[in-house]
Each structure stands twice: as structure tokens, then as C-alpha cells.
């Protein structure tokens, strides 16, 4: 079932990829132009500040009376230089949702119910996968698998390969995130 569905989604994903790559290209060009403009403004600002610095160096060797005469002009120029500082450019590309992808993936969503038995007061063990419901699309299908040969394992090291599934669990208080894994222990 997975291979035919994958080939159905390939053209859709390819089209979306091309569209988003075009948008990213446009954004990157815009950011590049902003950076070029900022670079040019910084160059001009550097020349202006160098010029003001040289004039201030010349003024500091003149008598105090001449310094006071040029004070207002230099103050206005330095304030003007400070006001027109280049604005920073944030080189961050946008991310967009892929419309319809989540809805398309939801058609593969299945409802799985696990009956459990309590081995200790703290650890529920899913000894049997007695009620594996494949959803309303398959009425009349016997969803009772044979007794499970799988073991319960806790911790990150327990599942290092094979299949993993993210579980969408409504807010039940204590359980926030849960990942389950299926591993073939016969290999």
C-alpha cells in the first residue's frame, strides 16, 4: 500500500518543492539586495565619519575661539551622522505550510487500541495487541492478532532501529509526549 501511495504524492510534492524553491529564491534575492544596500550605506557612512574625524583633528589644534565658532556646525553634522545609521538586515528565510499535505496524510491515520494488564503498580504492560482497529474503512476485518511476542522496554536505548511512530494523544494530564517503537527481536 505504501509504494503506490508514495508515487501518487510524488508529483504533488515535486510541484510544491518547485513552488517553494522559487519563493526562497525570491526572498534570498531580496535579502541580498538589502545587504548590498546596507553595505553601500555603511561605506558612505564610513567616508562621512572619516571626514568628520579629520575635521575634528584639525579643529582640536586651533585656538578655543575658532573651536567655539565651528562647534554648532560640527555638532549638527555629528548628530546627523548618528541619526542615519544603516538598519540591520535579518537574513532569515520564511517557512510555509504545505496546504493539503496534513489532510492527505490524515487519510492514513489509524486508530490503535491496546488492552493492557498491570504487572506492577507502576508499569502497564501491553501483553496482547488484542484490539487493533484499522478504522471504519475495513468493516468486518478480524482485528484480533495472535498473542504478541514483543517485550516492554523503557528508555531511549531500548529502540535504536526499526519502526517508530509518534502518537497524537489528547491532553490527559500527565502524558505530554509519547513515542512508541516496534522492533523485531528475532533478528
Image (cartoon, helix red, strand yellow):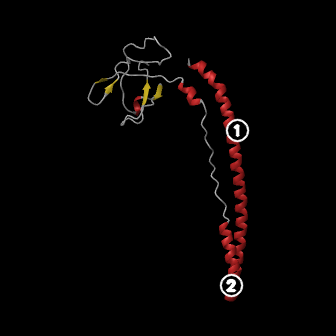
Q: Quadrant of residue 84?
A: bottom right
- Lower sequence index among marks 1 and 2: 1
Residue 57 place in picture, x, y as percent: 69, 78
The dot on residue 57 is none
Point 67% across, 61% down: residue = 86
Residue 90 left/right relative to 155: right
Residue 12 vertical placement versus 40 (above, below): above
Can you give x and y, in whole percent of width and height, for residue 66 in the image? 71, 86
Report which quarter residue 16 is drawn in. top right
Residue found at x 61% / y 41% = 95
Q: Secondary structure at mark 2?
A: helix
Instruction: Judge depth for marks 1 and 2 and give the one in front.
Output: 1
Q: CA distance from mark 1 to mark 2?
A: 58 Å
**Label 1 belongs to which residue?**
22
Mark 2 and mark 1 in contact (Cβ < 8 Å)? Answer: no
The spot of residue 103 in percent (x, y) is 56, 28
Tell me what residue is drawn at x 40 percent, y 29 percent: 158
Where, quadrant-wise, is the C terminus in this rendering? top left
Instruction: Identify the mark at residue 67; answer none if there is no mark.
Output: 2
Question: How many neighbours does mark 2 have within 10 angstroms: few (below 14), some (14-19), or many (20 or more)?
Answer: some
Q: Is residue 53 above or below residue 61?
A: above
Q: Is residue 109 left or right of residue 38?
A: left
What quarter of the picture does the N terminus occupy?
top right
Residue 43 appears at what percent x and percent y?
72, 62
**Image position of 89 with respect to 9: above or below:** below
Question: Where on the picture, by quarter, is residue 168?
Answer: top left
Amino acid at each position: 500500500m505504501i509504494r503506490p501511495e508514495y508515487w501518487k504524492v510524488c508529483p504533488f510534492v515535486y510541484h510544491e518543492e518547485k513552488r517553494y524553491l522559487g519563493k526562497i529564491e525570491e526572498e534570498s534575492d531580496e535579502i541580498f539586495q538589502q545587504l548590498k544596500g546596507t553595505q553601500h550605506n555603511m561605506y558612505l557612512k564610513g567616508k562621512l565619519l572619516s571626514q568628520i574625524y579629520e575635521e575634528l583633528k584639525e579643529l582640536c589644534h586651533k585656538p578655543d575661539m575658532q573651536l567655539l565658532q565651528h562647534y554648532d556646525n560640527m555638532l549638527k553634522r555629528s548628530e546627523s551622522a548618528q541619526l542615519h545609521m544603516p538598519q540591520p538586515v535579518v537574513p532569515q528565510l520564511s517557512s510555509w505550510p504545505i496546504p493539503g499535505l496534513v489532510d492527505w496524510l490524515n487519510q492514513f491515520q489509524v486508530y490503535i487500541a491496546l488492552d493492557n494488564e498491570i504487572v506492577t503498580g507502576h508499569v502497564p504492560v501491553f501483553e496482547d495487541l488484542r484490539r487493533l482497529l484499522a478504522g471504519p474503512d475495513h468493516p468486518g476485518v478480524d482485528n484480533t492478532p495472535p498473542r504478541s511476542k514483543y517485550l516492554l522496554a523503557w528508555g531511549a536505548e531500548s529502540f535504536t532501529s526499526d519502526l517508530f511512530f509518534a502518537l497524537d494523544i489528547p491532553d490527559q494530564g500527565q502524558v505530554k509526549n509519547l513515542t512508541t517503537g516496534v522492533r523485531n527481536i528475532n533478528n
